[in-house]
Image: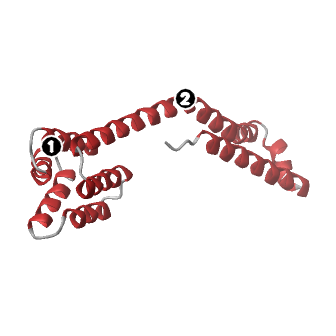
Amino acid sequence: MYKRQALNLLVNGLRSGYSMLQAMEAVSEELPPPISVEFARVVKEVGLGLSYEEALANLVRRIRSDDLDLMVTAINVQHEVGGNLAEILDTISYTIRERVRIQGEIRVLTGQTMLSGYIVGFLPIAITLLLFLMSRDYIMRMFQTTCGWIMIIVAVTIIASGFFAIKKIVTIDV
């Protein structure tokens, strides 16, 4: 959440006429830690003589984030090529917002399938425990024979593979 706020604050600062360093300093003053501390370090590193590219590379190294990497890459490309950095960062901010929205929609749409996977995975265990409580002798015969152990191993393998297959199907990367 703070990444989007930081990005929006950078965009608004650049649009109002701040330099990139001034916009980063505004982020370090306006937002709460940890994002403010990291941007303050970038400002301090640039003030001590590091280039923007090196200071931003250090930021990406400290904070592992694909969104931040995308932002830093855009800043570095704009620094080399030129162009409207505020517009580029605004587009990146929109892309991040849309990705978060789509992830939420996917989570909602796959929630029922995940619940089905949990039910399919744990229902046999619940029924076995219920049978154990109701008729201990009946269920214990399963554990006393080789054929019973083979059936248990096969059932657990099939249930586990079904559970993980459902989980793999509903896990979607955005």
Q: Position of residue 7 (x, y in %)?
A: 24, 44
Is the residue under label 1 in contact with that under label 2 (CB below 8 Å)?
A: no
- Which secondary structure lies at badge 1? helix
Query: To which quarter of the image does residue 3 belong?
Result: top left
Q: Which amino acid type is marked by label 2?
A: Leu
* SS at circle 2: helix
Q: Position of residue 161 (x, y in %)?
A: 72, 48
Residue 109's disc is: 2
Q: In the image, is residue 157 above or below residue 15?
A: below
Q: Is residue 128 left or right of residue 147?
A: left
Q: Residue at x 9, y 51 (%)?
A: 22
The residue located at (20%, 41%) in the rendering is 11
For the point 42% across and 38% down, which residue is it? 99
Count residues near mark 2 (Cα–Cα under 10 Å), then give few for <14, some for 14-19, many for 20+.
few
Task: Please identify, in this view, whether the residue under mark 2 or under mark 1 is nearer the observer.
Answer: 1
Q: Viewed as shown, does residue 26 lie left or right of 137?
A: left
Question: Which residue carries the number 1 mark?
Answer: 14
Horizontal arrangement in the rendering, residue 125 relative to residue 139 (left or right): left
Res 132 quadrant in image: top right
Residue 127, above or below 145: above
Q: Judge from the rendering whether residue 74 lies leftward or rightward of residue 140; answer left or right.
A: left
Residue at point 9% right, 48% down?
29
